[in-house]
Image (cartoon, helix red, strand yellow):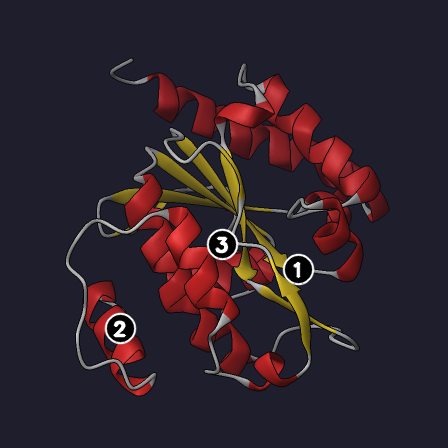
Amino acid sequence: MNKNNPLSDILKFYKDLGVTHLNLNTPSLETLEKEIGECTRCGLSRGRSGVLAGWGSPRARLMLVADALNAVALQEGAPVHGEAWELLKKIIKAIDMDPEDVFITNAVKCHSEGLAKPSANEIEACRPWLLNQIKLVNPRVVVALGTVAAQSVLATEAAISAIRGKFYYLDEYPVMPTFHPEYLLHNPKSKGEVWHDMKMVRDRLGQGG
């Protein structure tokens, strides 16, 4: 993986799929979702029950990346489900944004029965799709929710506890890693740390309008 040139990762990704000609017209998130549904880069493709490219505004200033898609989230058409989804919406509102004005996606787009935690190979196989989405949405800030999301966005092996709380960069995009809302449900004392991180996100979004 070329950590310094995501475009080369994307081109290699399409080459590995057997694509010999790229349509240089600007793609859409809807087109990307169809392509994700035909992806065979990892073993998840053999047993997937569906894909979800994302949720929310395709022109969002804020993009959030969650971890892997699960069955309930897929059925509900949201990247996160249940109490974690409600908590995530509260977090977004707490920084003075409407949840429908952000774009939320998953680091791993497919759901496959029995998937507990994505492997490093599955995260890497799905990363070019995520990089494509970031380019298409073109947000001012990206937030990576949890270890899987942070490892995917930043091409790192670090745990979220080691890197949260400050901005990193993916090309020109500032990236804030923080805890996933599901983690907060089991570790409510960490809500203060997430609030610290999200205030930094709010401040960054407020710079320049």
The quarter of the picture where residue 69 lies is bottom right
Question: Toward the viewer: 186 or 40?
Answer: 40
Write down the residue under mark 2. 9
Q: Position of residue 26 (x, y in %)?
A: 21, 49
Is residue 183 shown left or right of residue 203?
right
Given contact means CB atoms under 8 Å apart, are the residues at marks 2 and 3 in contact?
Answer: no
Q: CA distance from mark 1 to mark 2?
A: 23 Å
Quadrant into which the C terminus falls:
top left
Q: Residue at x 45, y 77 (%)?
A: 125
| Position above or below: 60 against 136 | above
Write down the residue under mark 1. 69
Decide if residue 68 is in sight here: yes
Q: CA distance from mark 2 to mark 3?
A: 23 Å
Is residue 183 shown left or right of residue 175?
right
Write down the residue under mark 3. 163
Mark 3 surroundings: few (<14), some (14-19) or many (≥20) residues within 10 A: some
Q: Position of residue 143 (x, y in %)?
A: 48, 42
Mark with earlier residue (1, 2)? 2
Question: Toward the viewer: 81 or 187?
Answer: 81
- Of circles 3 and 1, the one toward us is 1
Mark 2 surroundings: few (<14), some (14-19) or many (≥20) residues within 10 A: some
Is residue 161 shown left or right of residue 17?
right
Question: Toward the viewer: 171 or 186?
Answer: 171
* Residue kind at label 2, given as amino acid type: Asp
Element class at badge 2: helix
Q: CA distance from mark 3 to mark 1?
A: 23 Å
